[in-house]
Amino acid sequence: MLHRIRWSAGLAALLVFLVGCGGKPAQVVKTGGPLVVSSTFKGEYPIKVVATTGMVADLVRNVAGKHAQVTQLMGEGIDPHLYKPSSGDVSTLNNADVIFYSGRNLEGKMGDLFVRMAGRKPTFAVTDYIEDQFILEDEEQHFDPHLWFDVSLWSKTVGVVRDVLKQFDPKHAAEYQANADAYQQKLAALHEYAKSQLATIPKEQRVLVTAHDAFRYFGRAYDIEVRGVQGISTESEASVKEINELVQFLANRKIKAVFVESSVSEKNVKALIEGALKGRNHTVAIGGELFSDAMGKDGTPEGTYEGMIRHNVDTIVKALK
Ligand code: ZN
């Protein structure tokens, strides 16, 4: 079950605990306004940072440089929507100096834990400081948390990490600023790469069908029509009706390839392919595996945010062109 996190701008950053009705878990209500870190670092370097997804961890590594040691909770192939923190994770978070998570309800089962941690140490959702006007929602007004697929939007989260670190560790503020500037330049080039590559796919073939609806920001940023078998969270199951509609869509539009995701089961995508072949005699192939909510293996190019985006763009262009 997804809970809508309300966001209203203009007030100082604060956390409010809300107890949902019917014994539902507490929700975090975070307001906008200036980013304030209420404590400064007093320990021994490197600063111990804990990040949830690979995308957030990579962000922090780029901005913090040598001054922080980043522990990433969710590795290759891990689905953050369903991720339940282990007792080991809780002690890792307890021992951290600073915590960064993606936010907008991506880590749907960790909300209570973040509220607890925020009472004790700097705990920030990097997407919370992106203005609401840029945030997509589904029909039920749930935030779409997959902001990292619009590289220009994700680049704004660099500023969040930079500002938290500058306040928490003012001694190295100039370095955090310089690192952030350099990384944002790199991301600007990456955004242009994605835009120019994807524009080479003829418009009528520029349709991305994937296991879950993780690519709506990608679609908006790079002018691609997107369809997911499951919704914006992998928590909801796809119905037979939804699969049949998508099969019809594939046949009508003569779409040749659909994509599997590294952190989501292939089951629904395979059902699509079988449905298209059996029901409508339309052949659809798997266009490749995309990294959606988790990056690739550590130490490979896809184990970085930049490599993950490049892999996805190149895979999509190759399959659809
Ligand atoms: Zn997702």
Image (cartoon, rainbow, N blue to C red):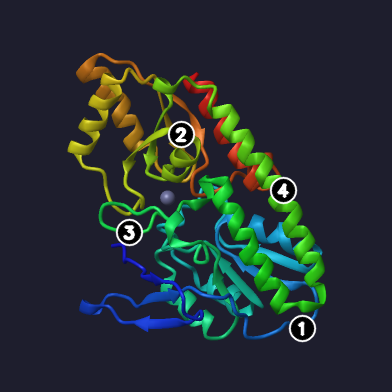
Is residue 125 visible from the viewing direction of this image? yes
Disc 2 beta carbon < 8 A from ligand 1? no
- Residue 308: image location, x then y, percent: 60, 41
User: Relative to residue 180, is residue 200 depicted above or below?
Assistant: above
| Quarter of the view holding residue 197 | top right
- Residue 224: image location, x then y, percent: 44, 32
What is the three-letter code of the residue carrying label 1?
Gly
Is residue 54 visible from the viewing direction of this image? no
What is the three-letter code of the residue carrying label 4?
Gln
Asked which secondary structure carries label 3, the reply is loop
* Label number found at residue 43: 1
Residue to which mark 2 is pinned: 223
Residue to which mark 4 is pinned: 185
Using the numbered discs, state the Cα–Cα distance from disc 3 to disc 1 in whole angstroms: 39 Å
User: Relative to residue 1, is residue 10 depicted above or below?
Assistant: below
**Of the image marks 4 and 1, the number of the one nearer the N terminus:** 1
Asked which secondary structure carries label 4, the reply is helix
| Quarter of the view holding residue 137 | bottom left
- Residue 44: image location, x then y, percent: 80, 80
**Of the image marks 1 and 2, the number of the one nearer the N terminus:** 1
Q: Residue at x 25, y 13 (%)?
A: 281
- Local packing at callout 1 (Cα closer than 10 Å; few below 14, some 14-19, many 20+) is few
